[in-house]
Amino acid sequence: MTPIQLKQVVDCMGATVRNDERQPTSDPPLTLSLKAQDGQIYLLPLSERGAACIWEVISLWRQGQRFGKSEAVGRVNN
């Protein structure tokens, strides 16, 4: 599958969290509201695993910034 590139995200305007047992389990536990540079709003539904993976990649990226590394940051997807 070909990846879809979003425009640069400049703000996270908040999130909707599913914490109601009556909601269908097919609803994502977390949906981020992201604002792109051109003002477009994107809704990004995340599973717990998806959120954890994003957190891990951002943490690695921030560590790289502190130590002056400029290599690609990623994780092995099992």
Image (spheres, grey):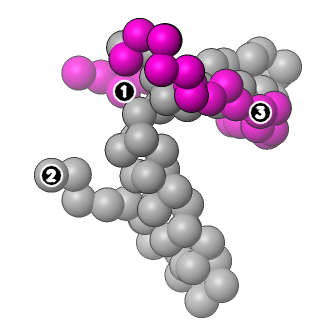
Query: Residue at coordinates 65% horizontally, 84% vertically from top-left?
Result: 66
Q: Which residues are magenta?
A: 1-25
x, y (%) of residue 22? 48, 12
Q: Quadrant of residue 71?
A: bottom left
* Res 72 quadrant in image: bottom left
> Rounded to the nearest whole Å, what is the CA distance between mark 1 and mark 3?
25 Å
Circle on res. 14: 3
Q: Which residue is mark 1?
A: 3
User: Decide: marks 2, 1 in contact (CB < 8 A)?
Assistant: no
Label 1 or label 3, whichever lies nearer to me, is 3
Q: Secondary structure at mark 1?
A: loop
The residue depicted at 60 percent of the width and 89 percent of the height is 67
Rendered image: mark on residue 78: 2
Sequence-first disc among 2 and 3: 3
Residue at left offset 70%, top offset 30%: 15
Percent x, y of residue 61: 55, 68
